Amino acid sequence: MVLRARPMDHNNMAINPASNQAVPQPHLRRLRTCDIDEHGRNLSGWQVRYDQVTPGGFEGELTEFRSDWLQLVRDRSNQALVKSGMAWKGAIIFALPLSANGPAFCAGHTLQEPSLIVAHGENLPELSTPLQLDALGVAIEEGALAHALERQGSRFEITDLPKCYRMADPTVRTRFAALFDNLLNGEQACLQKLEHDSIRRGIRDAVMLQVLELVAPDEAPPLNPTARKKMVDRARDYALAHLDEPLSILDVCNHIGTSRRKLQYCFQETLGINPVAFLRTLRLNAARRELRESNRVELVQTVAARWGFWHLSRFSSDYRTLFGETPSQTLQRTHLC
């Protein structure tokens, strides 16, 4: 699946496909949803896919501030997720957790301590996030960032990404959380203030200065995928390429040339979950996505079979456990909308 990004418009305008005219976008948005795919689509200018890993209904909230060459996002979710995709073209992304219930996994690395991930928007590393995540994302246009780095004599290299920085100063997360709280305190009044360019520029510049301080030492090693993560990716690719067959860990092990014990160790080390559960979860997410995107009422059994689930009752039970609703309820809700 090829993901393509829509460039960020510096004047906070989006193109209406029906009229081919620019439509003004608000400088501050807050969106809540109980649908994981809708939550991903709410992130303007990005093309991302979220797969739910832990069982239960999904709840997400997205708060977004935009000003010229900067996009500031607070992303809250209650379930553990696997996130993949890309941001808008020319963006450099800075991502850090404000709070979380457990470690994250990125490119096969376990992030036990609060960490700052820096990456090109078009080459984001896959991220496995924990339960009850409250995360911050800062997207800065590469040209604006490069200009500031040059003027300030920074050693930070945009070309040497992705990287992961340990967050030594615990107050950084508190300050960013307070910024969003202030933005949403008296939301309507704040929206009126944000109509003033000087207010937006003040917020934008303060965020840029904070980001430059975080990467000033530039002592973080590149965040390259580990050998275990590459093995996990090969196992996933094989499982998704053989949807006409029931999931067989024996076949997966034979294909990638490893033992079940080693495969399980790789999955636990890079994702915190065993391979059978993870690969089944990916198929369930894909089946749900197809049910949500279908423009016609399709038999649940047909969709289930297409994603390798031969026993409808088992599929329905696993589906309900993971998403908090039955496949039929997903279909019904989709077509009611």
Image (cartoon, rainbow, N blue to C red):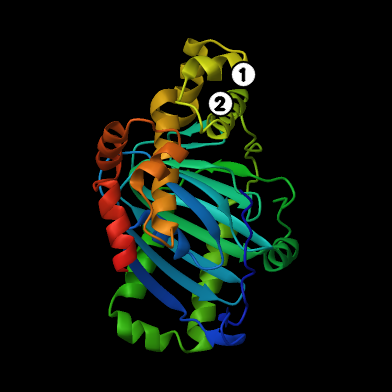
The answer to whether residue 330 of the structure is visible from this angle is yes
Task: Pinpoint residue 75: horizontal percent, then vertical percent.
Answer: 40, 58
**Above or below, comparing residue 124 to residue 60 in the picture:** above
Q: Which mark is residue 95?
A: none
Q: Which of marks 1 and 2 is nearer the N terminus?
A: 2
Residue underneath mark 2: 235
Q: What residue type is labelled 1?
A: Ile
> Do labels 1 and 2 touch, CB within 8 Å?
yes
Question: Callout 1 environment at 10 Å: few (<14), some (14 to 19), or many (20+)?
Answer: some
Element at label 2: helix
Q: Which mark is residue 256?
A: 1
Image quadrant in which you'd find residue 179: bottom left
Task: Pinpoint residue 204: horizontal percent, then vertical percent.
Answer: 53, 73
The quadrant in which the C terminus is found is: bottom left
Image quadrant in which you'd find residue 309: top left
Q: Which amino acid does label 2 sit on?
A: Ala
Residue drawn at 39 percent across, 56 percent down: 292
User: On the rendered structure, is 219 left or right of 27?
Assistant: right
Depth check: 82 or 286 in front? 286
User: On the rendered structure, is 100 left or right of 17?
Assistant: left
Element at label 1: helix
**Above or below, comparing residue 136 to residue 82 in the picture:** below
Total count of labels: 2
Depth check: 315 or 161 in front? 315
Residue drawn at 46 percent across, 40 percent down: 306
Depth check: 170 or 85 in front? 85
Residue drawn at 62 percent across, 39 percent down: 220
